[in-house]
Image (spheres, rainbow, N blue to C red):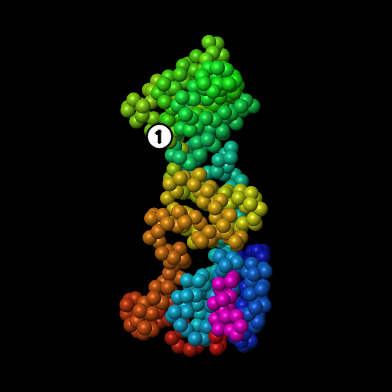
Amino acid sequence: MNNGGTLARPIPVVVIDDDDQALGLVQAALAEEELELLAFTNPQQGLDVILRKQVPIVLVDLVMPGLDGMRILERAVEADPTVEVILMTGNYSTDAAVEAIRKGACDYLTKPINLRRLRNRVQQIVSDIRRRQKAAELDEQLLRTCQFEGIVGRSPQMLEVFGQISRVSPHFRTALITGATGTGKELVARALHRLSPVSAGPFAACNCSAVVETLFESELFGHVKGAFTGAAADKIGLFEYAHGGVIFLDEIGDMPLAMQAKLLRVLQESEIRRVGSPQSRKIDVRVIAATNRELRTLVAERLFRDDLYYRLSMMQITLPLLVERRDDTPLLLRHFLSRFSAQFNKPLRGLTHRAQSVLQRYPWPGNVREMENVIGHACMMTRSEIIDVKDLPPAVLNKADWGALGEEDLLPMEEMEKRHALRVLKHTGGNKVRAAEILGIGRTTLYRLLGEIEQKPVEVSGKG
C-alpha cells in the first residue's frame, strides 16, 4: 500500500469489532507499513481513542453490545467531519445503509467481507488523505508566495492588477480604481500608497456615500470657527491632513455635482480653502478615487463631470469579480482560515470536502469581503477543528445557485453510484434482479456497488 516508499508518517486506523475472529482477519488484511492499526473489541475504548487521537480512518462493526457502530459513526463525524468511517455488518439492511451514508459513513460493507475490496477501499482512502495533506501544504506555501502587499491572488487577472500597481505607484498623482463592492479597492489604494514615494506620509480615507451633502466641503477641506451653525472650533479637512501623502475617495460616484466642481479645482490648483476662510492653503496630495459604479454612464447621464472623470482616470485599475478569479478561491479560504484561527485562538485545520465544494460553487455576490465574513462566521460557529457545511451561514446554504445541489453532488463518484443503487433497491422492495434491470447493469455489478458478493469465496464472517 506504500506508494513510492515515502517517509510519510503511518496513518492511524481504528478497527472496532466485538468478534475476535473477525477483528483478527481485518487486522491481517490491512497489515501495511503505511497504516498504524489500533484494534478494539470494546467499542467504548475504541471511541475514546478515535476522539483523542483524531483518527482519520475508522472501521466499525454495526451491531455491538452497549455502543453500536451507528452511534460511534455519529460521535466520530461530530468530532471530525473529515473522518472516513466504514461500517461493517452481517445483517444487511438497505435502510441502515442509507442512514449510515447520510450520517457521514464513506462505505457500508456486508459480512462476510471481501478482503480484497476492503484493502482497495482503504488504499483509496489513504491516497485521498495523502493528496489532501499535500494540497494543504502546497496551499500554505502558495499563500506565502502569492501575496502582494497584503492582497492574496495568483490568477492571471490578479497578477495583472499587481503589475499595474507596481508600475503606477512610483508616478501617479491621481488614480481611479473600479470594481464591484467587496473586490478590495481599498486594499489596492493602500498598496499604491505603500509603494509610492510618499509612503511615509499619511493615508486619509473618505467614504463619499456616507458623507452628508451639506458637510462634504467641511469634511474634505475643513472649516473655521463660526463658518456655519455648529462650527464651534476650527477643523482641519482630510486634504489638509493628507498633505505629503495620499487621500482615498471611496465611492466617488456618489459625490454631489457641486462638490465635484470644487474637487476638480483642488486637483488643478493644488490648494484648498477651509469653509468660512478667505485664505487658500497649498497642498501636496496624491488622490486615489474608487467606485463600484460605471462613471462613463454617469457622465452620459450628466450625474458626473466629464472633466473630473478624465482627470481622475489617467490611470485606471479595474478589479475582477471573485467568480472571475476562481483560481484564487482556495488561497483566499486558507488565508481567512489562518487569520481567524489566530484571531479566535482556535486550532482550525481546514474545511471538509463538502464545505469546499459549496464555497467553490457559491456565486459570491459580495466578492472577497463576503468570503471574509463567511469564513469568520464559520470559524466562530464550528465546534471542530474542521469547518463543515453545517458551520456556514444560512444565507450561503440557501443560495439558489447551489441550492439545487443534493448531498450526493458533494460526494465521490463511487459513493454517488452506491447511494443511487440503494435507493433503487429500496424502491423494488429489496428485489435485486429488478433493481439491476432498472439501473441497466448486471447483477454482479449491483453486488459490487452494494459491497456484497454473488458467490461466497470471502473470508470474514461475523454476526454484526
Q: Is residue 125 above or below residue 142?
A: below
Which of the two residues, 27 or 102, is positioned nearer the viewer here? 102
Left or right of residue 463: residue 425: left
Callout 1 amino acid:
Arg
Residue pictured at 55% horizontal, 17% vertical: 226
Placement of the C terminus among the 4 image quadrants: bottom right
From this viewpoint, which residue is outermost toward the top? 278
Residue pictured at 45% horizontal, 29% vertical: 252
Residue 132: where, in percent of width, then height? 56, 60
Residue 404: where, in percent of width, then height? 38, 60
Which of the two residues, 442 or 428, is positioned nearer the viewer here? 428
Left or right of residue 24: residue 215: left
Residue 94: where, in percent of width, then height? 43, 80
Left or right of residue 200: residue 417: left
Residue tagged 1 = 293
Residue pictured at 56% horizontal, 65% vertical: 82
Considering the numbered disc 1 on the image, is that residue within a helix, a strand or a loop?
loop
Task: Kindly tell me whether residue 357 is visible in this rendering.
Answer: yes
Whether residue 64 is in magenta: the answer is yes
Residue pictured at 43% horizontal, 39% vertical: 180
Q: In this view, does 23 lie above or below 403?
A: below
Task: Kindly tell me whether residue 118 is visible in this rendering.
Answer: no
Residue 43: where, in percent of width, then height? 63, 80
Which of the two residues, 414 or 216, is positioned nearer the viewer here? 216
Whether residue 99 is in magenta: the answer is no
What span is in magenta?
A: 59-76
Placement of the N terminus among the 4 image quadrants: bottom right
Number of numbered labels in the structure image? 1
Q: In this view, does 364 lie above or below 197?
A: below
